[in-house]
Image: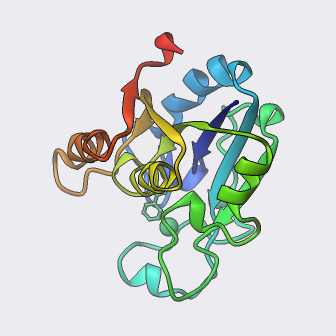
């Protein structure tokens, strides 16, 4: 059984947001077009308290309950079976969807007999990277959908380096058209 893991397609990571990636919202139609090919769809939300050590590294973003923390309006949320929230404590970054605090994601996926996880969303060089590496570590066959991710690129090339790192760790890179 295959799951789609949609990472952080939230307003603050899209054009005009507090921590915008270039063209972040462009992943939404790509994701919408493939979502029905999966047995289960999980979406993560970066979901921070107002005060957190995370904001010593980053501008304030995705504060729980704020507009910036909402899913981007272009993402079809009707297909989402389960939302997981991460980065909710003030002492960690919570980059990985597997660090969600409202649900043990790994256990949840296993309880649904998922053995394969396709990761997409934002940002390639942080939360997608951590989530894909954790997925692989937890024993799921892990794919990363190259045309359905966007990077922060604090340093030029960070997104591409993250993709290589995921590949090196055993994740497979695919295009949405190959699914
Ligand atoms: C993210 C930086 C800070 C992400 C979250 O979703 O990739 N990046 N918080
Ligand atoms: Zn964050």
Q: Position of residue 11 (x, y in %)?
A: 59, 50
38 vs 45: above or below: above
Quadrant location of the N terminus in the rendered image: top right
Q: In this view, does 58 lie above or below 172?
A: below
Q: Determine the residue located farthest toward the left in the rendered image.
A: 156
**Quarter location, residue 50:** bottom right
Residue found at x 68% / y 25%? 35
Outermost residue, top side: 177
For the point 72% across and 37% down, which residue is it? 41
Does residue 122 appear to the left or right of 39 in the view shown? Answer: left
Describe residue 13's horizontal placement relative to residue 78 as left or right. Answer: left
| Quarter of the rendering containing residue 164 | top left
Residue located 41% across and 53% down the image:
133
Where does the image place residue 113, in percent across and percent down from the top left? 75, 40
Residue 77: image location, x then y, percent: 77, 37
Point out the image quarter for the C terminus. top right
Which one is nearer the viewer's eye here, 101 or 142? Answer: 142
Q: Nearer the viewer, residue 137 or 85?
A: 137
Asked which colour scheme the image uses, the reply is rainbow
Q: Would residue 37 be seen by someone viewing this image from the given angle?
A: yes
Q: In this picture, is 140 found above or below 118?
A: below
Image point 38% across, 46% down: which residue?
Answer: 124
Most foreground residue, 86 or 167: 167
């Amino acid at each position: 059984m295959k799951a789609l893991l949609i990472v952080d397609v939230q307003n603050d990571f899209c054009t005009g947001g507090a921590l915008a990636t270039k063209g972040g919202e462009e992943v939404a139609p790509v994701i919408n077009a493939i979502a029905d090919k999966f047995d289960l769809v999980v979406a993560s939300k970066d979901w921070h308290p107002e005060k957190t050590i995370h904001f010593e590294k980053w501008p304030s973003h995705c504060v729980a309950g704020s507009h910036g923390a909402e899913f981007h309006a272009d993402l079809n949320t009707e297909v989402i079976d389960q939302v997981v929230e991460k980065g909710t404590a003030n002492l960690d970054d919570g980059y990985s969807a597997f660090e969600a605090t409202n649900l043990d994601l790994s256990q949840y996926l296993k309880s649904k007999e998922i053995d394969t996880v396709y990761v997409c969303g934002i940002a390639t060089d942080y939360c997608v990277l951590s989530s894909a590496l954790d997925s692989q570590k937890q024993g799921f066959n892990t794919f990363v959908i190259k045309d359905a991710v966007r990077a922060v690129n604090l340093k030029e090339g960070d997104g591409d380096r993250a993709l290589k790192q995921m590949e090196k760790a055993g994740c497979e890179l695919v295009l949405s058209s190959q699914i």
